[in-house]
Image (spheres, rainbow, N blue to C red):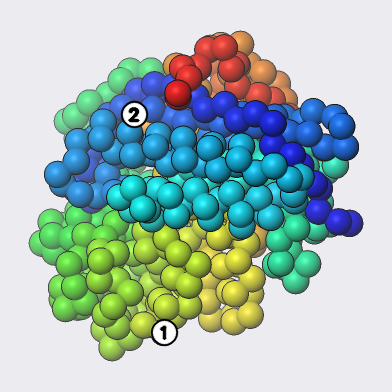
């Protein structure tokens, strides 16, 4: 089919305050609260109005990790990227396919944001949300699901026809272990007493977990000590487990990374964990990651990029320096994920991983999960359900609407819906609906406008 041609008529930006039930520490940042951004697009397709939507958490100290900026300044950066994207998409007078909108309005918005001093990873955020919402509207207009629409060419991107998209029914959940997370039930610390697990040990029991993502601090002695403690818990409770390691840019150069890896592989207590490690994610700071080769460091597991993925050639540049793949995150853009998946499909030695940025219940977690799983990712980091209680501050009416529309994806047996994690897996069958992974919408009147 030809791409669905849309004329963008209206773009509304919103946010909602999100309070975390547990502090989430990654790298040098600890997050206890932040806003979630929402985009609502109304477009005209053959004289009819269609709606599309998307959402992403505005996480501080990830898109821009400058220590000189406050969390609120980070939030405002992301709002600015959204405003610039709104202006660019509304300024496009023609009816275009979703990918054509991304190539014109999206690229223009990123250029404006960068010219105004925003880092490219921040600048991409606004366009990424608009791209998801426009794709949602196009798929609804065509009455096609994400997988069927992409395969049929509804988005108009150049990679879909060559990709063998899966129609996944399930995906393994990879549980995040943040740097502030309690590991055992006996360990002192904060417990919100809300009926949800507050420790790694409790989460394994509650969800049947067997895949884990372990955050590193970049401090070798502290990391080795914590990994050893985590390994003890996993050996005792998680069966035939697997882990990934996330450096979160905490190593300043390849030399320090090499020292860490040497210490890791020569620590007897970590030998079993190392054999079960699937990948190491973005260990080097983005300022040096694509300048220093890691090929000679002797790292036995695949090393992938994440935060360095702020331009279209990032993956190819990384492969030349010894990296083995890259992450899919909807907050970096659906077309970036499609492009990288196409490149990785050409070489069986490379991998595409699925990583989270505390995707919240509703639009964000549904769209991001289906995006990655449809591209062949078999285990995906999900952490929003652990750090936020269900739908958080969303109205009960909204939570129940999503739970009813996606009964297998959410567990509504308690007083409030939560992500349904059974035997360490998510049931994706209810996400294969017309549109981009959702048959429900936020309660728009409950959100605060971003003007």
Q: Can you give x and y, in whole percent of width and height, for residue 227 in the image?
A: 24, 57
From this viewpoint, is residue 8 visible?
A: yes
Instruction: Tell which of 338 and 196 is nearer to you.
Output: 338
From this viewpoint, which residue is outermost toward the bottom?
A: 296
The reply, left or right, for residue 347 in relation to residue 27 is right
The residue at the point 25 percent across, 66 percent down is: 287
Give how far across and how far down residue 45 sits, in percent.
Answer: 82, 37
State the residue position of label 1: 320
The answer to whether 82 is drawn above or below residue 42 in the figure is below
- Which mark identifies residue 136? none
Q: Where is residue 401 in the image (x, y as percent from the top left)?
A: 67, 18
Q: In which quarter of the image is residue 120?
A: bottom left
**Element carrying mark 2:** strand
Q: Position of residue 428 (x, y in %)?
A: 68, 42
- Name the quarter where the N terminus is drawn: bottom right
Disc sitting over residue 34 in the figure: 2
Above or below, comparing residue 1 to residue 257 in the picture: above
Q: Residue at x 41, y 84 (%)?
A: 320
Whether residue 233 appears in this view of the structure is no
In the picture, measured across the screen, residue 310 lies left or right of residue 427, that is left
Taking the view exactly as shown, the residue that stands out farthest to the left is 221
Element at label 1 = helix
Foreground residue among 395 and 45: 45
**Residue at (43%, 49%) from the top-left corner?**
112
Residue density around tag 1, few if under 14, some if 14–19, many if 20 or more, within 10 Å = few
Query: Which quadrant of the rendered structure holds the C terminus?
Result: top left
Q: Nearer the viewer, residue 281 or 229?
A: 281
Cα distance, mark 2 to mark 1? 37 Å
Residue in the image at 78% along x and 34% along y: 44
- Judge whether 195 appears above or below 204 on screen: above
Sequence-wise, the earlier of marks 2 and 1 is 2
Relative to 312, is 124 above or below? above
């Amino acid at each position: 089919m030809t791409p669905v041609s849309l004329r963008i008529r209206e773009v509304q930006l919103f946010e909602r305050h999100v309070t975390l039930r547990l502090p989430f520490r990654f790298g040098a940042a600890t997050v206890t609260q932040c806003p979630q951004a929402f985009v609502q697009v109304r477009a005209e397709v053959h004289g009819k109005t269609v709606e599309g939507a998307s959402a992403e958490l505005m996480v501080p100290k990830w898109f821009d990790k400058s220590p000189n900026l406050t969390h609120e300044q980070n939030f405002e950066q992301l709002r600015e990227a959204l405003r610039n994207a709104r202006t660019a998409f509304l300024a496009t007078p023609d009816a275009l396919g979703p990918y054509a909108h991304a190539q014109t309005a999206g690229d223009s918005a990123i250029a404006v944001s960068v010219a105004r001093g925003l880092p490219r990873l921040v600048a991409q955020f606004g366009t990424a949300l608009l791209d998801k919402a426009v794709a949602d509207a196009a798929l609804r207009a065509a009455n096609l699901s994400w997988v069927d629409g992409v395969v049929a060419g509804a988005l108009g991107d150049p990679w879909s026809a060559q990709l063998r998209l899966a129609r996944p029914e399930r995906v393994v959940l990879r549980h995040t272990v943040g740097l502030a997370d309690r590991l055992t039930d006996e360990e002192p610390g904060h417990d919100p007493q809300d009926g949800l697990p507050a420790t790694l040990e409790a989460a394994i029991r509650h969800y049947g977990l067997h895949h884990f993502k372990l955050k590193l601090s970049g401090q070798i002695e502290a990391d080795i000590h914590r990994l050893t403690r985590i390994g003890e818990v996993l050996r005792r409770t998680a069966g035939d487990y697997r882990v990934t390691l996330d450096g979160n840019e905490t190593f300043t150069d390849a030399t320090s990374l090499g020292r860490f890896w040497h210490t890791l592989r020569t620590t007897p207590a970590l030998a079993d964990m190392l054999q079960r490690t699937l990948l190491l994610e973005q260990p080097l700071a983005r300022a040096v990651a694509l300048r220093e080769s890691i090929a000679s460091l002797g790292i036995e597991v695949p090393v992938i990029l994440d935060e360095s993925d702020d331009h279209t050639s990032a993956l190819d540049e990384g492969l030349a320096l010894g990296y083995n793949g890259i992450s899919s995150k909807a907050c970096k853009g659906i077309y970036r994920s499609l492009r990288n998946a196409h490149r990785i499909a050409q070489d069986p030695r490379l991998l595409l991983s699925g990583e989270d940025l505390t995707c919240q219940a509703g639009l964000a977690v549904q769209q991001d999960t289906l995006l990655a799983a449809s591209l062949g990712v078999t285990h995906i980091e999900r952490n929003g359900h652990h750090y936020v209680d269900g739908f958080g501050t969303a109205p009960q009416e909204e939570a129940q609407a999503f739970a009813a529309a996606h009964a297998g994806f959410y567990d509504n047996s308690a007083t409030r819906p939560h992500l349904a994690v059974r035997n360490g897996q998510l049931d994706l069958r209810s996400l294969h609906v017309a549109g981009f992974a959702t048959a429900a919408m936020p309660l728009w009147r409950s959100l605060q406008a971003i003007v």
